[in-house]
Image: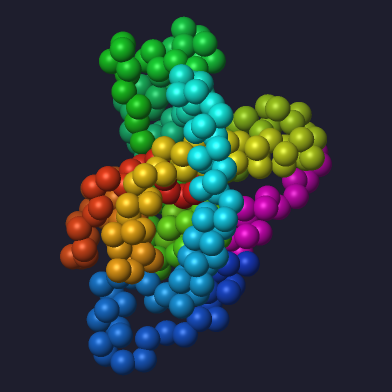
């Protein structure tokens, strides 16, 4: 068996965490209290990465999303999004099982089988019509169920808002997805190419769905970084069913479910 090379995502996460470890910690009691509220002890590093992400979004990602919207008709965009959602079902099912949610795993398996067959390879959302609604499940969520704390807030290069637990979960979910192994048959070049293409397609689809929402959020925020942090943390807390310390209200027009991380 040929040993697999470390994935680009894994190497990026290791480099990011190493950089984060070098950042300064709060000095005063006030900074410590504020740090507990926002859970962002490495804010200077996070803001730098956020600014780079935002620059790349303005320069490249948003224009590409606009071009995608103009060039591809809505019915085709819907089919692409549906296929990508269907491709994510095996990872959701695996996490449902690891969380002990056997009923949710059965629902996810049924959805995958129905949408893959009757739904034409996932192009059409058929399963919900039979009462099988889409479930949630990622390895960050699984770690939460296992009792692992979220760790500090992080902004990942290109992937956007996260935390230590969800960053690890993202890496595991990427490795867990079966499609690159099915497509590649052991060829690491094909595997890497498919992984990049899949991430790009997912990111482009999500970004196109949130052009107006992100624009309004950016324009309506005195501190875009802080607002994005609040949106992510509140959305994630709601998704996990946990109580969060008070922060500014979430911007309702921004669809966090389909926008973060940028490439996922």
**Residue sitting nearer the eye, 112 or 261:** 261
Q: Is residue 11 magenta?
A: yes
x and y percent of residue 16 in the render?
58, 67
x and y percent of residue 173 in the render?
52, 43
Residue that extends furthest to the bottom in the rendered view of this protein: 28
121 vs 142, left or right, is right
Q: Which residues are magenta?
A: 1-14
x and y percent of residue 233 in the render?
31, 58
Residue 255 appears in which quarter of the rendering?
Answer: top left
Residue appearing at x 52%, y 56% in the figure: 58
Residue 233 seen in the figure? no
Q: Quadrant of the N terminus?
A: top right
**Residue sitting nearer the eye, 147 or 119:** 119
Q: Is residue 68 magenta?
A: no
Q: Is residue 22 depicted above or below 226 in this figure?
A: below
152 vs 10, left or right, is left
Q: Is residue 68 depicted above or below 51 in this figure?
A: above
Q: Is residue 195 depicted above or below 231 in this figure?
A: above
Residue appearing at x 75%, y 46% in the figure: 4
Residue appearing at x 54%, y 15% in the figure: 121
Residue appearing at x 43%, y 48% in the figure: 260
Residue that extends furthest to the front in the rendered view of this protein: 70
**How many numbered discs sit on the rendered protein?**
0
Tell me the colour scheme of the image: rainbow
35 vs 140, left or right, is left
x and y percent of residue 104 in the render?
33, 28
Residue that extends furthest to the top in the rendered view of this protein: 118
Residue 39 seen in the figure? yes
């Amino acid at each position: 068996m040929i040993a697999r090379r470390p994935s680009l995502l894994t190497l990026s996460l290791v480099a990011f965490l190493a950089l984060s470890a070098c950042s300064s910690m709060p000095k005063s009691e006030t900074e410590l209290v504020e740090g507990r509220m926002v859970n962002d002890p490495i804010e200077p590093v996070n803001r730098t990465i956020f600014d780079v992400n935002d620059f790349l979004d303005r320069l490249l990602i948003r224009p590409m999303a606009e071009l995608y919207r103009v060039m591809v008709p809505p019915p085709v965009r819907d089919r692409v999004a549906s296929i990508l959602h269907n491709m994510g079902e095996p990872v959701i099912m695996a996490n449902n099982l690891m969380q002990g949610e056997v009923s949710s795993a059965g629902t996810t398996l049924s959805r995958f089988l129905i949408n893959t067959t009757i739904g034409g390879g996932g192009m059409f959302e058929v399963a919900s019509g039979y009462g099988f609604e889409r479930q949630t499940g990622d390895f960050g969520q699984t770690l939460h169920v296992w009792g692992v704390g979220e760790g500090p807030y992080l902004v990942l290069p290109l992937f956007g808002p996260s935390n230590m637990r969800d960053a690890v979960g993202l890496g595991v979910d990427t490795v867990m997805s079966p499609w690159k192994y099915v497509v590649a048959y052991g060829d690491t070049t094909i595997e890497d190419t498919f992984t990049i293409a899949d991430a790009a397609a997912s990111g482009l689809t999500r970004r196109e769905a949130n052009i107006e929402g992100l624009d309004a959020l950016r324009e309506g925020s005195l501190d875009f970084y802080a607002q994005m942090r609040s949106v992510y943390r509140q959305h994630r807390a709601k998704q996990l069913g946990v109580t969060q310390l008070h922060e500014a209200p979430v911007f309702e027009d921004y669809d966090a479910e389909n926008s973060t991380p940028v490439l996922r």
